[in-house]
Amino acid sequence: MRAAPINPADLNAIEGKYPGKREVPAVPGFEGSGIVSETGRNVSKLTVGSLVLLPHDIGTWREACAVEAEQLVIVPPEVDPVQAAMLKINPLTAWRLLHGYVELTASDWVIQNAANSAAGRSVIQIAHALGYKTVNVVRREELIEELRTEGGDVVLMDGENLRDEVKKATGGAPIHLGLNAVGGESALRLMNCLAASGTLVTFGAMSLQPLKIPNGLLIFKDLRFRGIWINKWYDNATPAERMAAFNPIFEMTGRGLLQTKVEKTYPLSELKAAVEHAARAQRRGKIIFEFGVH
């Protein structure tokens, strides 16, 4: 193993609050990168020294593991191993959010809440690289300039006047895609910003509140509501479909267009401190386990 992040889903799994519970004792960790150190006799597509992404059900918080070759994704050498370790959940989710639900063209608008999350920042960076425009909704004023610097076209504070502020900031441009990681009242405010027949895709529930969908938004606006769990999409996708998403993500990462901020790296021996750090609110980046090359 080279690197493995601590994601909210990892903490939820440890707490027993995540789908697909495993028998304990079990190794946590849904994503990570490693270097191939040895291959079986029948393996032809992997070579020793290749950087690879691991499957999400193996448990990545470990120094080494044996994995079936076809479950690994080969990463181009220009991608940093630490960045590679964080590509399979948030950037992949962001790519699917922008490509799986509404057909977007250059200069189309997308709106999202929790824009400062790892997935939200990936949406900003990928959309910026592809020429889409983003309205990014946050709850802390100090994030506004930070997200603008990262490529967010419009960054606004969440609140009761959100619809009017979005309309003013975008010149009344129609928004057909909303991305919801919060739920509750925040999601409702996103719905009210969408154009007729727009789509709201939910991929998180940070507020722990359900969606509240007024009948009028279904009857008169014909809004559509979808959801994505990236692990399930990955399991159901063909190898070609997976690589159709990974290849542009690898290319953007290799060119520095897609980067995930890291607040601190820890050795596995400091697991408790690392998990406690990852559980803190208002972090400025990911917490990562980094391993030496074996």
Image: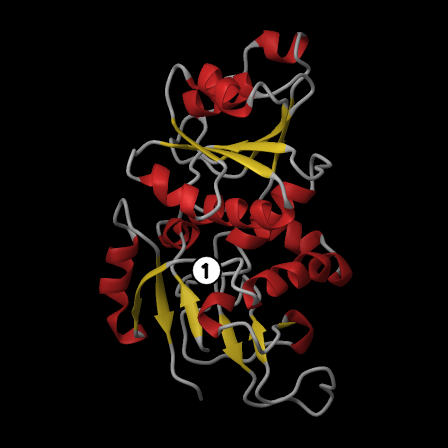
State how the image is colored.
Answer: secondary structure
Residue at numbered disc 1 = 23
In terms of depth relative to the viewer, which is nearer, 227 or 135?
135
| Residue drawn at 53 percent across, 16 percent down | 192
| Residue drawn at 54 percent across, 53 percent down | 91
Label 1 Cα crowd, 10 Å radius (few <14 / some 14-19 / many 20+): few
In terms of depth relative to the viewer, which is nearer, 108 or 270?
108
Residue type, mark 1 in image: Glu
Viewport quadrant of the C terminus: bottom left
| Residue drawn at 40 percent across, 36 percent down | 206
**Is residue 211 in view?**
no
Location of residue 208 by image quarter: top left
Residue 120 percent coordinates (x, y) = 47, 43
Q: Is 20 on the left or on the right of 260, as rendered?
A: right
Q: Is residue 198 above or below residue 205?
A: above
Location of residue 103 by image quarter: top right
**Is residue 76 in view?**
yes
Residue 271 percent coordinates (x, y) = 28, 67
Residue 61 percent coordinates (x, y) = 40, 69
Residue 25 percent coordinates (x, y) = 39, 65
